Image (tube, rainbow, N blue to C red):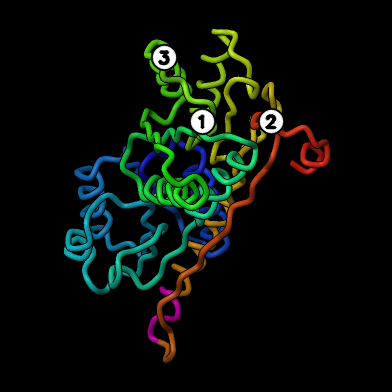
Amino acid sequence: MPNIETRRYREIMSGVETVALKKQHVVMLCNTHANPEEEAEYLKMVVGRQVDGLILASPLLGSKQLKALLGPDLPWVHIGPSAPGLCRNLCYINYEEGAYQMTTHLIKMGQKEIALLLDEAPLEEMKQITAGYLRALREQLPGVKENILCCADSPQGGYFTTQRLLQDGTLPRAMITASGGQASGVLKALQDEKIAVPERVALACLSDSATCAILQPPLTALETPSRRLGMVAARMLFDNIEDSDEEGYGPQEVILQAKLKIRRSCGNTKPIYELFG
């Protein structure tokens, strides 16, 4: 895992453990801190310990490095889109489509100046999110300047980034953050300066949580089935371990879809969305 402190990775881990427990297997967690060198060291260690299988989430190493470290015989599953030929079995959440839907929603709410705040770690999810954001802008607001920012995936990261935008006089009319932590930091910075949300700045995030629904205003967010993703990855791995010698066993790819939860932080006033969001 790149960062176990991040909510989505904790939920993935929970899903993996749920399936592993039923299969009477123990899960060994390796937190790489989004560092390729740590990732390589952990992979050497788990291969040396002759583990039954491996689930690798958002790896930072390239295809050649992964192939050299893992070898041809270790069963493994890749959480995230994979380069062709890298892994037989992969599963991931369609963050590109989720980011596209979120950006489209803001455009439909009348926004034309939309900034995207990403995690500063070079994770595969951030590439997907960027692709969806850019696709929406180019299709629906051709010629509009894109605005992509990066900061730590934390409330502090969102807070200090918003402060810098305020100091520079470059605060956009709308912001999409990669995580709820970043969004809470952005919201706090805006509230400290008495900047109204959504009247002056619309705010949304790409990771829903119970906290998003109780913030003021409630935060429009993307509901992502991260725990289910972990369960899918674990089931795929056990299928690989148990059935790899059977005739007809082949590559698998499972893509899970996210769901837009529309709340008031982007300007929605329809109570039906609040009721089901």
The answer to whether residue 105 is magenta is no
| Circle 1 residue | 175
Label 1 Cα neighbours within 10 Å, binned few <14 / some 14-19 / many ≥20 = many
Residue at x-position 42% and y-position 66%: 90
Disc 3 is placed on an element classified as loop
Disc 1 is placed on an element classified as strand
The span shown in magenta is: 240-245
The answer to whether residue 242 is magenta is yes
Q: Which mark is residue 35?
A: none
Residues at circles 1 and 3 in contact by the CB criterion of under 8 Å: no
* Place of residue 261 in the rendered image (x, y in percent of width and height, measured from the top left): 67, 43
| Residue type, numbered disc 1 | Met
Residue at x-position 45% and y-position 19%: 162
Label 2 Cα neighbours within 10 Å, binned few <14 / some 14-19 / many ≥20 = some
| Residue type, numbered disc 3 | Gly
On screen, 213 above or below 272? above
Disc 1/disc 2 C-alpha distance (Å): 13 Å
Disc 2 is placed on an element classified as loop
On screen, 19 above or below 112? below
| Circle 2 residue | 267
* Place of residue 276 in the rendered image (x, y in percent of width and height, measured from the top left): 78, 43
